[in-house]
Image (tube, coloured by chain):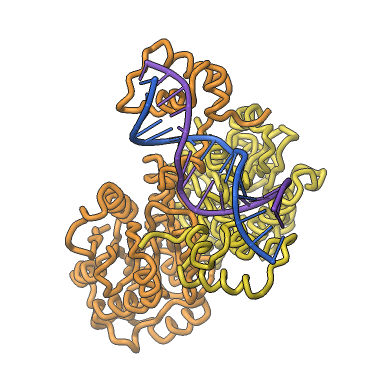
Chain colours: A orange, B yellow, C blue, D purple
Amino acid sequence: MKKATLKDIAKAAGVSVATVSYVLNNAPNQTIPDETRCRVLDAAKQLNYVPNLTARSLVMQKSGLIGILINRPESDGSWSRLRHAHFVDGLERLLTERGYHVILSGLDAANPKLDIISERKLDGVFVVDAKKESFHLISSRFSEGVPLIAVDSVIDDPLFYKLNYDYEDAFTKLGASVNLEQSYLIAEDFNNAELAASITRSSGIPADRTHVMKNEERLRQFLAINTNRTGIVLNEFTSAIAAQHVDPAKLAVICTAGCPDIVPHAASRIAFGSRKPEAAFELMLQLLDDPGSGPKQKYIQIKAVNG
Amino acid sequence: MKKATLKDIAKAAGVSVATVSYVLNNAPNQTIPDETRCRVLDAAKQLNYVPNLTARSLVMQKSGLIGILINRPESDGSWSRLRHAHFVDGLERLLTERGYHVILSGLDAANPKLDIISERKLDGVFVVDAKKESFHLISSRFSEGVPLIAVDSVIDDPLFYKLNYDYEDAFTKLGASVNLEQSYLIAEDFNNAELAASITRSSGIPADRTHVMKNEERLRQFLAINTNRTGIVLNEFTSAIAAQHVDPAKLAVICTAGCPDIVPHAASRIAFGSRKPEAAFELMLQLLDDPGSGPKQKYIQIKAVNG
DNA sequence: TTGAAAGCGCTAACAC
DNA sequence: GTGTTAGCGCTTTCAA
């Protein structure tokens, strides 16, 4: 048996498709007598009706689809692929709850295929860890006004909202218990170079004591020449790996992946909590509701929390 | 400026929409002179044309959308939310590469809303860690013949393909180096009870020495009364947590999350590699190509690999 | 070699 | 109150 359509229901209930559409959508400006309404509802149940969102999208000019577009990390150790897992999971949850459907798409950071936005008529988009150049591309082609939120990306374009962790805040708080000037830093390998730069800059740790996590072997080498110092490590996964090579007690980790549980107990830590998905979600809702209504401040920063 | 449509191109190129559609799709049975083809192609480029997949889906009766529907874990420690991250990441990559778009949707395991399958006219679906009951629901309403692959789920219904790790194989291989009868087991908390049961069964470890990972505190208590034994732990994240409470050298971990890097070096381990996304992808392609063409064996098992 | 036209399933004027 | 109808943007017979 084929999928039932509005027409099928109309026939079964002895009314027109318009009427069916009205009752099924609780059309605001239509007053339908209960008798009719019931007949339609019954028929719909009977026929196991499920609306065809493709058709609806076409006519409504909105898809109910939100994109989460993630630039794939350059290094592809298993740890790096988990970096955004918590964010994606949390955001998807919120979006799904709200009735949106989520399209997840990995992007080649060097050559992001953003056509999906127009092809699928996405109602809103999150772009995660994108290179600055990507945004030229975007702003030239997407004046179309699809709400777009850049995540984990520092870019100068005032057109977009930027959602980031407030690393400066994290380092300041960390500075209370550890002497940053004397530490080394294990940073994450972001595609967005400006974000990476802003992190190392706000850490105050000199470049020669900063290491960007690419793979375990190179990390080991770096750690070997720094064993006597305290290390600041970004990201829970990296901390778990680092802890295999140095005394975890000499590690302070900044939890960016929403997974503090796996950080060695002996390490001290500072976390960003799990506000990122929520903040992303709330801003998106606002933009979806009225594209002009977002906060005037285009940078949204998530504060660090102790513990 | 609004999005260009076929009609716009047609007008610009001085041809009909049909012709435009033909050249843009390289229609097989149409022979278009180069002159026309170029005019059309130029116009399309000029107008920055991007096809509207919604419209295409409607008429083609296929969406180009593949769903990854994941039953949310009951416990929601941050580690549990990462459980499928590697699978999702790998699968998404493969699917995207192949030109499909991926819809990611979390499901309430107790009451999975599977309507998305028909609403969005998904071409294929992966359902991850679903309760047995869900499949009654599915099989009653989805004789519709959407290729569906159950992942991390043991179910009796011969209708679906089941993709699982071969835990029995893992325990056998593990048995070579550790005495399973004398060990304890830390298992994962799957929604699919049959899978959980089959795992503990094939481990050969008695129930009173088996613990299902719910949260760190309860894990700690369990470990406290088992410190003198060797422990088998399922899943890398759990191993990282367990290692905080017992000597990692007395742990043997079965890596199911594609993230062996974070397992403590001192622990011995056995892994399932990263074949799961690939296996899922390949089977789906086959089913997509011809729904009847899958292997007759409905259970696909991923073997364990040492290391 | 090209085009007119019939839909795909749905929504929303606008008429009755 | 309810039905008619004109599309949304695209594919694809079928005729010219």
Task: State which quarter of the image contains the N terminus of chain A.
Answer: top right
Q: Position of residue A192 (x, y in %)?
A: 38, 75
Task: State which quarter of the image contains the C terminus of chain A.
Answer: bottom left
Is B101 in front, or is B250? B101
The answer to whether residue B157 is left or right of residue A303 is right
State the residue at coordinates (31%, 27%): A28
Q: Position of residue B67 (x, y in %)?
A: 56, 47
Above or below B174: residue B45: below
Q: Position of residue B286 (x, y in %)?
A: 74, 52
State the residue at coordinates (57%, 57%): B17
Number of marks drawn = 0
Above or below B11: residue C5: above
State the residue at coordinates (41%, 87%): A225
Residue furthest bottom in the image:
A208
Q: Position of residue A289 (x, y in %)?
A: 27, 47
The answer to whether residue A217 is left or right of residue C6 is left
Is B217 in front, or is A78? A78
State the residue at coordinates (34%, 85%): A209
Above or below B72: residue A292: below
Question: Which quadrant holds residue A99?
Answer: top left
Above or below A296: residue A6: above
Is B64 in front, or is A191? B64
Question: Which quadrant holds residue A236?
Answer: bottom left
